[in-house]
Amino acid sequence: MNANRPVVVAGAGSIGCFVGGVLGNAGRRVALFARPRVIEEINRNGLRVSSFEGFDRTLRPGELLLSDDASIFKEAGVVLVTVKSTDTADIAGLIARHAPPDAVIVSLQNGVGNIAVLRERLGGRRVLAGMVPFNVMALGQGRFHRATSGDIVIEQDAAGIVAQLSVPHLKMRPTDNIVGVQWGKLLVNLNNALNALSGLPLGEQLAQRPWRMLLADQIGEGLAAVKAEGIKPVAPTPVPLALTPHLLRLPDAAFRLLLGRAMKIDPEARSSMWEDLQRGRRTEIDYLQGVIAGMAQRHELKAPLSRRIIALIKQAEAGGKGSPGLTPEQIRS
């Protein structure tokens, strides 16, 4: 990676602004390709990046390049793709037209299908898959707050791009099994929809056994589907995925002890899908529960809970009133 060429964040929402801000704080040249609303917010307030661990920095607008014009890609050394899965094909087209041929493209998106879309539309370019395990909250006034723990994982490459991107407060690790890592993250991300439907902070939701039982059943459906597909997912937490449903069903006190060792969660953390519902945006449900339901159908497996949750999220999207604040019993009924 040429240090004189910027890291361009393609689709600077919550994750993109946080990652870009921490890289900028570490002295990297950073450019954010963002919506006008985000650009205006940062120009007015600066870009503030903070973490539940106590990290808190504000970058002045002049310390970053901000634009909603795709010409921002023209000098990119690295492009970090952080758009929603629904926008992957469109952002790939912009990168293909505007970014230098030798720019390294790194997907930091949810789901498992984005890397195939990027590689198809960016043929001949170096495209790497990645996984972001943590949650970032957009708190307004240019502030983006990391609310859960974990290190970014990026597939290993000969140029060592992971080591070049890893900075203080934003550790990145290489892996030679990014496919397994992405599928493991997808299974854990099945809670995104549950959290969105609940309207509760993540910590409060996971502290309640009925919600954990619901998540356990969701992951159980997912594990059966990926096993039938011949996929071996890798857990994004220290807890093995095969044990996760059993551990989620533990009594509250035992689970709290386990969660405290495996993961740190800000008291106000919520899922990105909750934020999508609150802002009236289309969610990524088709790329999470939708993937599990599709696989289950191919293998003639039953996935009634996945289908029920898809229907409830789409109903909430259509209603446009944010989280419906459902109970576990209402979701199961």
Image (spheres, rainbow, N blue to C red):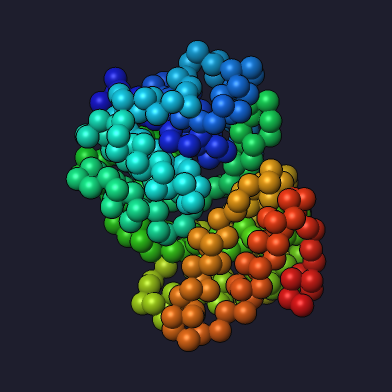
- Evaluate whether residue 269 shows in this view: no
Please name whichever residue, 293 or 215, is drawn nearer the observer in this view of the structure: 293
Residue located farthest toward the bottom when viewing the structure as drawn: 300
Residue 249 in picture, x, y percent from top left: 67, 74
Please give the name of the residue rendered at 80% of the width and 66% of the height, measured from the top-left corner: 327
Q: Is residue 276 left or right of residue 171?
A: right
Please name whichever residue, 123 or 215, is drawn nearer the observer in this view of the structure: 123
Please name whichever residue, 304 or 200, is drawn nearer the observer in this view of the structure: 304
Please give the name of the residue rendered at 40% of the width and 58% of the height, measured from the top-left corner: 113
Q: Is residue 288 above or below residue 216?
A: above
Residue 60 in picture, x, y percent from top left: 55, 15
Figure disc tally = 0
- Evaluate whether residue 101 shows in this view: yes
Residue 232 in picture, x, y percent from top left: 38, 71
Residue located farthest toward the top when viewing the structure as drawn: 62
Please give the name of the residue rendered at 68% of the width and 46% of the height, measured from the top-left corner: 280
Quadrant of image for the N terminus: top left
Quadrant of image for the C terminus: bottom right
Q: Is residue 103 left or right of residue 165?
A: left
Q: Is residue 115 above or below residue 139?
A: below
For residue 14, what is the image quadrant? top right
Residue 261 in picture, x, y percent from top left: 60, 56
Please give the name of the residue rendered at 55% of the width and 19% of the height, measured from the top-left corner: 59
